[in-house]
């Protein structure tokens, strides 16, 4: 039996199911990121984006409705892998200034994934003449780009430098400990 040929409309539907699953998974993962962040502005930015993500899920449900499809997700190995890595980074770096940098590192991986998906999905909708769908997807895309820019600003303004400063302080403390040990040995 020959496989039915699939077209761009099928790819759009597949991508929508993929990103719907991804957004729900992201929404569930964000509280850990919020809790793990020590920088107040970073916590606020992630909290705000969690609220935005909830709205994006609702927008995706309207997209499905506009296409006469039932909203449903399809397991997305890519986002599962990105979120698994984020969880691992939180465990390895949590509670430090480098932990905040790691949260941004992981969050931007999520944002970049979403940006590529929404950009492609918007283009498919445009090509298929689904202008209302394209407009809704573009609205989400703009939110994802803004979230990525906010994370970059936080990293560049302070968080990455704080992580460097913390590393320098740890090295200085280690050097002092070594010097004290050498002094004791010399006595």
Image (cartoon, grey):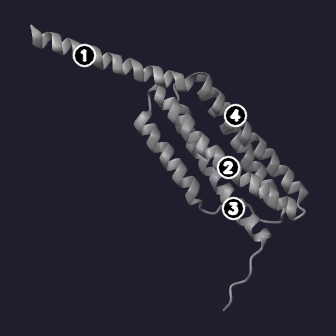
Q: Which residue is mark 1?
A: 177
Q: Do callouts 1 and 2 mark residues in contact (Cβ within 8 Å)?
A: no
On the rendered structure, is 131 left or right of 24? right
Q: Do callouts 4 and 1 mark residues in contact (Cβ within 8 Å)?
A: no
Disc 1 versus disc 2: distance between alpha carbons? 46 Å
Q: Do callouts 3 and 2 mark residues in contact (Cβ within 8 Å)?
A: no
Instruction: Name the element at disc 4.
Output: helix
30 in relation to 129, above or below: above
Disc 2 versus disc 4: distance between alpha carbons? 14 Å
Residue 102 pos. (x, y %):
50, 35
User: Label 4: few (<14), some or many (≥20) within 10 Å?
Assistant: some
Q: How many marks?
A: 4
Residue 39 shows in the view:
no
On the rendered structure, is 105 left or right of 179? right
Residue 109 pos. (x, y %):
59, 45
Instruction: Name the element at disc 1.
Output: helix
Q: Residue at x 46, y 19 (%)?
A: 165
Q: Nearer the viewer, residue 79 or 58?
A: 79
Q: Which residue is mark 4?
A: 149
Q: Which quadrant of the rendered structure holds the N terminus?
A: bottom right
The label number, if any, that marks residue 17 in the structure image: 3
Residue 65 pos. (x, y %):
82, 60
Of the numbered discs 3 and 2, the one sitting upstream in the chain is 3
């Amino acid at each position: 039996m020959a496989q039915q040929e699939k077209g761009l409309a099928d790819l759009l539907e597949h991508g929508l199911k993929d990103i719907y699953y991804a957004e729900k998974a992201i929404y569930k993962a964000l509280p850990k990121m919020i809790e793990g962040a020590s920088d107040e502005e970073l916590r606020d930015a992630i909290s705000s984006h969690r609220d935005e993500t909830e709205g994006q899920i609702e927008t995706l449900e309207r997209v499905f409705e506009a296409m006469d499809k039932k909203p449903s997700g399809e397991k997305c190995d890519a986002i599962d892998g990105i979120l698994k890595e984020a969880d691992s980074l939180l465990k390895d770096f949590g509670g430090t200034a480098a932990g905040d940098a790691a949260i941004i590192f992981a969050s931007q991986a999520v944002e970049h994934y979403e940006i590529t998906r929404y950009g492609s999905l918007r283009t498919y909708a445009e090509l298929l003449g689904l202008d209302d769908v394209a407009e809704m997807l573009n609205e989400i895309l703009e939110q994802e780009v803004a979230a990525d820019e906010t994370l970059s600003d936080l990293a560049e303004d302070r968080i990455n430098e704080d992580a460097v400063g913390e590393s320098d302080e740890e090295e200085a403390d280690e050097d002092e400990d070594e010097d004290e040990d050498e002094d004791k040995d010399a006595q």
